[in-house]
Amino acid sequence: MTVTLPPDYVPSEKEPFMNPLQQEYFRQKLLRWRAELLDESFETRLNLKETSVLEPDLADRASAETDRSLELRTRDRARKLISKIDEAIGRIEDSSYGYCEETGEPISLKRLEARPIATLSIEAQERHERAERTRRDD
């Protein structure tokens, strides 16, 4: 089933949760985010190839290495994020997207707007964070 989104569509609490329009809205949002990350990754690879020339000055070389290290860490985070985006798209396809992995309750649309890869409701996320802090404090 192909769903066409109206150009100005925004999910609303007034409509059934994760109806086909909402699913398509979030699928497109995730695909755009994924494409942006891949474009940035491509740009990074080009920049790293261009700057691979060794700097003769020690300070310049150290600065270039620091920049390269930061860029690679950023790309690694982007790679992990792309994996989470792919998982979220898979959840849309199997109709589990938008529901808390822990409670099965719907994740709020506001939370999904802000973090479309969310797998936990705010309440479940807060419980996890409190448990993490407790474990760290022990």
Image (cartoon, rainbow, N blue to C red):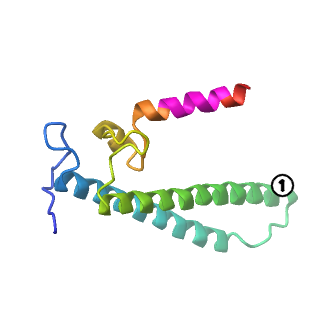
Is residue 101 found left or right of 27 in the rendered image? right
Quadrant where the N terminus is found in the figure:
bottom left
30 horizontally vs 62: left or right: left
Residue at 18% x, 56% y is: 20
* Stretch of the chain drawn in magenta: 126-134
Using residue 38 as the reference point, say whether residue 56 is left or right of it. right
Q: Residues within 10 Å of mark 1 (few under 14, many from 20)?
A: few
Residue 133 counted in the magenta span: yes
Q: Is most of the magenta stretch helix, strand or loop?
A: helix
The quadrant in which residue 74 appears is bottom right
Query: For the image shown, how many numbered marks are present on the structure?
Result: 1
Check disc 1 and report its element: helix, strand or loop: helix
Q: Residue at x 37, y 63 (%)?
A: 90
Q: Quadrant of residue 46?
A: bottom right
Closer-to-camera residue (104/68): 104
Label 1 sits on what residue type? Ala
Q: Residue at (72%, 57%) from the top-left corner?
A: 69
- Percent across and percent down for residue 15 are 13, 42
> Where is residue 77, by image quadrant?
bottom right
Residue drawn at 30 percent across, 40 percent down: 106
Q: Is residue 61 magenta?
A: no
In this rendering, the answer to whether 123 lies above or below 116 is: above
Location of the C terminus (image quadrant): top right
Return the residue at label 1.
59
Q: Nearer the viewer, residue 2 or 101?
A: 101
Q: Position of residue 34 (x, y in %)?
A: 42, 62
Counting from the top left corner in percent of width and height, residue 123 is at 42, 30
On the image, the x and y values in percent for residue 13 come to 19, 37
